[in-house]
Image (spheres, helix red, strand yellow):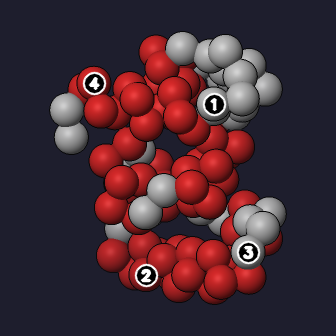
Amino acid sequence: MEQNEKRKLLRQLVWDYNISADDIEAVLKGIKVTAGPFTREKLLIRMLESYPWFTIIQLISIEDIHRLLTRDMISRLRSQSLKEKYEFVRNRLQQIVSAPG
């Protein structure tokens, strides 16, 4: 994915706030704690509810998704079908991504 496209997707993610793509990316990378009202977890929830899986993995690493995608986060998704989809993804990531340590 080209950087311009990535920046556009990050800005669209927080369309209702005036937050720069650089600030959003810094939060996703763990450089900043928040951008406006958004933490990494809140940004990931928006991604899960807005973008297809193959777009999400181009915006945030699989390792970060593995760390952030908890049962609690999944329970905060609005749609039951998304909850089921990402519970499956969470289980698969536990099998294929080795935990740090």
Q: Which residue is mark 4?
A: 4
Amino acid, disc 4: Asn
Q: Nearer the viewer, mark 3 or mark 1?
A: 1
Q: Which mark is residue 73?
A: none
Q: Which residue is mark 1?
A: 15
Q: Which residue is mark 3?
A: 79
Q: Say if mark 3 contacts mark 1, CB within 8 Å.
A: no
Tell me: 24 left or right of 80: left
Q: CA distance from mark 2 to mark 4?
A: 31 Å
Q: CA distance from mark 4 to mark 1?
A: 16 Å
Q: Earlier in the sequence, mark 3 or mark 4?
A: 4
Q: Which mark is residue 92?
A: 2
Q: Residue at x 74, y 82 (%)?
A: 80
Q: Residue furthest left?
A: 2
Q: Earlier in the sequence, mark 3 or mark 1?
A: 1
Q: Which quadrant of the rendered structure holds the N terminus?
A: top left
Tell me: 81 left or right of 66: right
Q: Earlier in the sequence, mark 3 or mark 2?
A: 3
Q: Nearer the viewer, residue 4 or 36?
A: 4
Amino acid, disc 1: Trp
